Amino acid sequence: MSSPAAPPPEASIRDALAPGLLGLYATDRFKLSTGRCQDCLAPQQALWYFNDDMIAVAKADAAGYAPRLRAQEDVQAWLIDGKGRPSGQPPSLLWIGSPHVAEGRLQAGGQLSRAGNAAPLAVTLTPRLSSNRAYMDDSSVAFFADGEIKARGALRDEHFVIRTLWPKRYAINAAAASQPLARGETIESLVRAEHGGAQANFAVRTLWRRDGGAQPMALAGKPVLGFILNGAQGDDDESYGGHFAVATGRFGGAGEWDDWLVNNFYSLASVSEKGIIAATLPMDAYMGDLNSGQSWYRPSYMLVAVLKDARAPALYQEAISRVFSHFYRQDFHYRHASTNCAGINVETLRTLGWQIPRLGGEAPLKAAMALPYMALKDVSLASGQSAYDYLKTERTELLPFVAFNTIGEDLLRRLTSGAARSGLEAQLADDLEALLFVRLPQYPSSRAFGSDPVLSLREYQQRAPANRADWKIVPVAPRAFPATFKDPAAPRERRPASARATWVWGGVAVTALAAGGWIVTRRRKTASRRLQPSARR
């Protein structure tokens, strides 16, 4: 497919792949297309999810995958083959969504004022999805009118259709003097401040600097590995756990970070009410898409590892790109209780050699009893298995807030103290120059403000209505994966722990039934003998 027509030459409007970076990669390594591309390097299964949407696909030398291996086995084999070093291969597919980028000041009258002598540009908004319960309103316009904005969208008939909005005042041009956590302060307390800070100001704090200097440290061009925690929504009782993602990229010349790449895992089995599709995509699209952007419906937080070398984020990006190929092929499935946004990313980081501390399941002993109890209570084996997995799953791979906390603490304590061992964690320990904590408020709109996410299943139960029927949720339609896309030679997906527990309980039930039947039979025989006439008269 050919690229969209080039925009006018004004500096404030440019092609989505104008010279620059997408994450760690030069934009000229990609071409714009849609999922209907016939000559793209991405797997056909991945392209299918973006049939009529704008994507950027690698022109050559894209990160591949081993179709006969499971995802993490693939990453492990690739890591060994490459001797633990990245090879510079970009992702095969990025979800861009828009052909053009515009910059300027958003005006209440539906115009975008631009730099220099360029005339104001009329703007309209991409339509709200019918399933999306809230949208941009006058409070949103006031928020973005407070400074320069960057918008992704499409130039059509002398007006610009805005799809994403990003406040350019969020640029981070320097790391301030280190302000370590004080006594009584934790990463958890930073996240929980002001009930999660949905209506607070954008803020950046330097938690650690290698040089310990009191002067600002320039960030332009520095590579980063970023860990993103999105909070709880204010209008969805299924969202209290929040969301987790990992970003890679470099700071721009003026401290920009809107073009970092975010690796965002969501369920592919349903059609999101906000139009979210699991993908690697630019930060400004991840946060600011008018329908699917995280900042439109909850506050967010980020830990940014500022590095002197790009090897660690490049290694992660190439590894997670392989995982995405397996995910799109449905070699494994997104499971909220065992293989979710936190679990997929944390497992990959561990495969790369970062020994992120394990905390164990929240209640592994209760899990064993929860399976039969919930199965009987709800008359649903799936309900019992889900309860088992939630209570049994390693907490850093289950709850986004736990993953975020544990990664942050490990960076601050172990990796900066010289205790790192090998692999990715050794690279991070050697290259880490600063660790930043970034707080991003929720964009104001017609949506209720969100809050901080939960840190435990018990906290989730305390927040959610006791009666499940009272929960505020948005029903979503299933997304049917074409049977022709399933590779019959792909390895069988590993079953969740609850599958094994079900077999155990099944064995117990069969044994109990057999024992019960034997006892009943014995009693009947005994009773029968007692009722027979005596041989002696």
Image (spheres, rainbow, N blue to C red):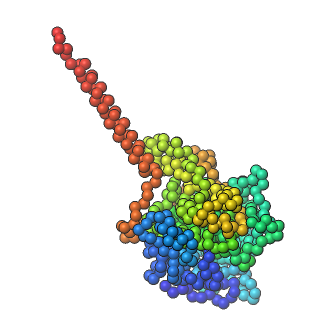
Q: Is residue 87 shown left or right of residue 213?
A: left
The answer to whether any part of residue 49 appears in the image is no
- The residue sitting at the right extreme is 214
Residue extending farthest to the top is: 537
List the single residue furthest toward the bottom: 9
The reply to whether residue 303 is in sight is yes
Percent position of residue 375, x then y: 44, 44
Q: Residue at x 38, y 44 (%)?
A: 506
Question: Compared with residue 63, is residue 536 higher up or lower down, i.e. above or below?
Answer: above
Looking at the rendered structure, the number of numbered marks drawn on it comes to 0
Pick the front one: 160 or 64: 64
* Residue 512, x across and y down, in percent: 36, 36
Image point (47%, 79%), residue name: 41
Q: Is residue 489 left or right of residue 151?
A: left
As displayed, is residue 171 above or below residue 510? below
Q: Nearer the viewer, residue 159 or 275?
A: 275
Name the spot of residue 406 as percent of width and height, x first: 64, 56
The part of the image, by quadrant, that contains residue 68 is bottom left
The quarter in which the C terminus is drawn is top left
Q: Residue at x 58, y 53 (%)?
A: 358
The percent position of residue 164, horizontal first and vertical second, equals 63, 73
- Taking the spot 63% from the left edge, 51% from the top edge, the residue there is 455
